[in-house]
Image: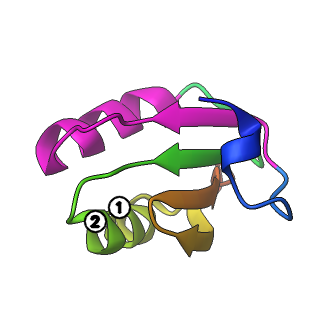
Amino acid sequence: MKAEHFPKEWSFDDIFDAVDLGCGDLLLDLKIFANPLRPGTRFVVASRDIGSPREIPAWCRLTGNRLIAGKPPYYLIEKKNNHHR
């Protein structure tokens, strides 16, 4: 997936393309993707799952990562600092 698909005003370091993963697989794979990232890393999640507008913000709240913006099917997230949760 290329950066030109995302909102032009977004600045990010990496992309997680969830393809058409459903809720369980999406959230598990997202955790695996995000864990090794350095704190402060901004990344985009691309998800076409119909539950993503609720699942992605909930995942951010539960994990302590910051949802900066959401324009389905794209979500801009900042990796949490290690001092949180």
Badge 2 amino acid: Glu
Q: Secondary structure at mark 1?
A: helix
Asked whether residue 19 is drawn in magenta, I would say yes
Residue 34: percent from left, percent from top = 52, 36
- Quarter of the image where one finds residue 29: top left
Which residue corresponds to mark 2? 55
Residue 43: percent from left, percent from top = 66, 44
Label 2: few (<14), some (14–19) or many (≥20) C-alpha neighbours in 10 Å? some
Furthest toward the front, the residue is: 5
Q: In front: 28, or 39?
A: 28
- Mark number displayed over residue 85: none
Residue at coordinates 63% horizontally, 59% vertically from top-left? Answer: 76
Residue at coordinates 60% horizontally, 66% vertically from top-left? Answer: 66
Which residue corresponds to mark 1? 59
Label 1: few (<14), some (14–19) or many (≥20) C-alpha neighbours in 10 Å? some
Tell me the distance, in whole angstroms, between the alpha carbons under discs 1 and 2: 6 Å
Badge 1 amino acid: Trp
Residue 5 appears left or right of 40: left
